[in-house]
Image (cartoon, rainbow, N blue to C red):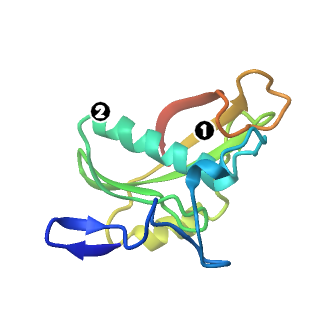
């Protein structure tokens, strides 16, 4: 992308996308296929974090920050009724229906104590809607179990 007087414009033709492996132009439509690709763990977590963020916003809370890095806790900070609060978000796949609170939750609380001791947990259960026994495929409907956040 390059900045022009009228805004940002692709420097190259087409989509302006380059494959870093071979410096060739990429046409996103040529990458579309019917191949079944399983949803990655980070994608489930990203979806779950977005749902919790929207759930909190609908309840009138201000979101301070969110992220979907599975190696960093907590995933969400928001302004609760009594000041800043944090949320750890976890996603489970069928046959698990409930995600587990991380075993290091006390260490997470200790890391957050400078800003807040008000911690919460959000559990998500995911299954492929058409057949819970199969993987969750990208582009296919999934059943999601989420019952709000629970104080830790």
- Residue toward you, 47 or 98: 47
Q: Which residue is mark 1?
A: 124
Badge 1 marks a residue whose secondary structure is strand
Q: Which residue is mark 2?
A: 58
Q: Quadrant of the N terminus?
A: bottom left
Q: Which quadrant holds residue 142? A: top right
Few, some or many C-alpha atoms within 10 Å of disc 2 (few <14, some 14-19, many ≥20)?
few
- Residue at the farthest right position: 133
Residue at 38%, 60% (x, y): give it: 117
Q: Pointer 1 and pointer 2: residues touching (CB < 8 Å)?
A: no
- Residue toward you, 102 or 49: 49
**Residue 149: percent from the left, percent from the top?**
46, 39
Badge 2 marks a residue whose secondary structure is helix
Residue at 41%, 68% (x, y): give it: 112
Residue 24 shown left or right of residue 39 in the figure: left
Question: Could you tell which of marks 1 and 2 lies nearer the N-terminus?
Answer: 2
Q: Which quadrant holds residue 130? A: top right
Few, some or many C-alpha atoms within 10 Å of disc 1 (few <14, some 14-19, many ≥20)?
many
Numbered label tally: 2
Residue at 72%, 43% (x, y): give it: 33
Disc assigned to residue 40: none
**Residue 144: percent from the left, percent from the top?**
61, 29
- Whether 14 is drawn above or below 115: the answer is above
**Residue 43: percent from the left, percent from the top?**
61, 50
Q: For the residues marked 1 and 2, what is the alpha-carbon distance in whole angstroms?
A: 18 Å
**Residue 37: percent from the left, percent from the top?**
75, 45
Residue at 64%, 57% (x, y): give it: 102
- Residue toward you, 152 or 44: 44
- Residue at the farthest left position: 5
């Amino acid at each position: 992308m390059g900045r022009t007087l009228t805004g940002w414009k692709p420097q190259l033709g087409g989509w302006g996308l380059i494959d870093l492996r071979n410096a060739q132009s990429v046409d996103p439509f040529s990458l579309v296929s019917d191949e079944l690709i399983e949803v990655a763990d980070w994608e489930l977590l990203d979806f779950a974090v977005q749902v919790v963020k929207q759930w909190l916003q609908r309840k009138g809370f201000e979101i301070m920050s969110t992220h979907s890095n599975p190696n960093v806790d907590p995933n969400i900070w928001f302004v609760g009724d009594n000041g800043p609060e944090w949320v750890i978000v976890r996603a489970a796949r069928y046959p698990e229906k409930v995600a587990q609170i991380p075993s290091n939750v006390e260490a997470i609380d200790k890391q957050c104590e400078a800003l807040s001791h008000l911690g919460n947990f959000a559990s998500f259960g995911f299954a492929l809607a058409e057949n819970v026994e199969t993987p969750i495929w990208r582009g296919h409907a999934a059943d999601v179990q989420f019952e709000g956040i629970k104080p830790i």
